Image (cartoon, rainbow, N blue to C red):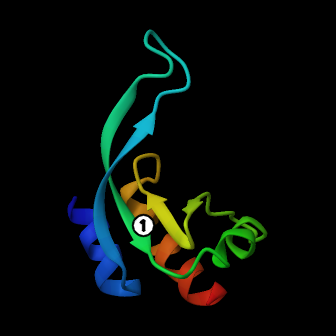
């Protein structure tokens, strides 16, 4: 939660309850609760964020972009903010 709130303070958006899905391990396919940053009307950033030297993987749905920081190292959260700002 706190990192998502900090990211929201930097780039805007709202925080929503979401899930991340585990892809491997002892329980593949099991959803885990994860706060998401929702950027309404910014799904156009999806492609731009993927083409950066350090791509930012996001989800998009109904015109919104969703960012899940679950696999982003705490020290790299600022890079996600910079990428969003750069791609706007």
Q: Is residue 86 above or below residue 55?
A: below
- Quadrant in which residue 7 is drawn: bottom left
Q: Which residue lies furthest to the front in this view?
A: 62
Q: Where is residue 48 in the image (x, y as percent from the top left)?
A: 73, 76
- Quadrant in which residue 9 is drawn: bottom left
Badge 1 crowding class, 10 Å Cα cut-off, few under 14, some 14 to 19, many 20 or more, is some
Residue name at image x 65 percent, y 77 percent: 45
Give left or right: position of 44 versus 74. Answer: right
Q: Where is residue 11 in the image (x, y as percent from the top left)?
A: 41, 85
Residue name at image x 43 percent, y 13 percent: 27
Q: In this view, does 57 lie above or below 32?
A: below
Q: Quadrant of the N terminus?
A: bottom left
Label 1 sits on a secondary structure element that is: helix
Residue under pointer 1 = 77
Q: Residue furthest top?
A: 26
Q: In which quarter of the image is the C terminus?
A: bottom right
Give left or right: position of 84 versus 49. Answer: left
The foreground one among 85 and 32 is 32
């Amino acid at each position: 939660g706190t990192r998502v709130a900090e990211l929201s303070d930097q780039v805007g958006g709202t925080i929503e309850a979401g899930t991340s899905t585990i892809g491997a391990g002892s329980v593949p396919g099991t959803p885990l609760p994860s706060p998401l940053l929702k950027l309404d009307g910014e799904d156009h950033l999806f492609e731009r964020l993927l083409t950066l030297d350090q791509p930012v993987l996001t989800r998009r749905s109904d015109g919104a972009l969703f960012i899940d920081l679950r696999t982003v190292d705490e020290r790299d959260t600022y890079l996600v903010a910079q990428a969003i700002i750069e791609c706007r």
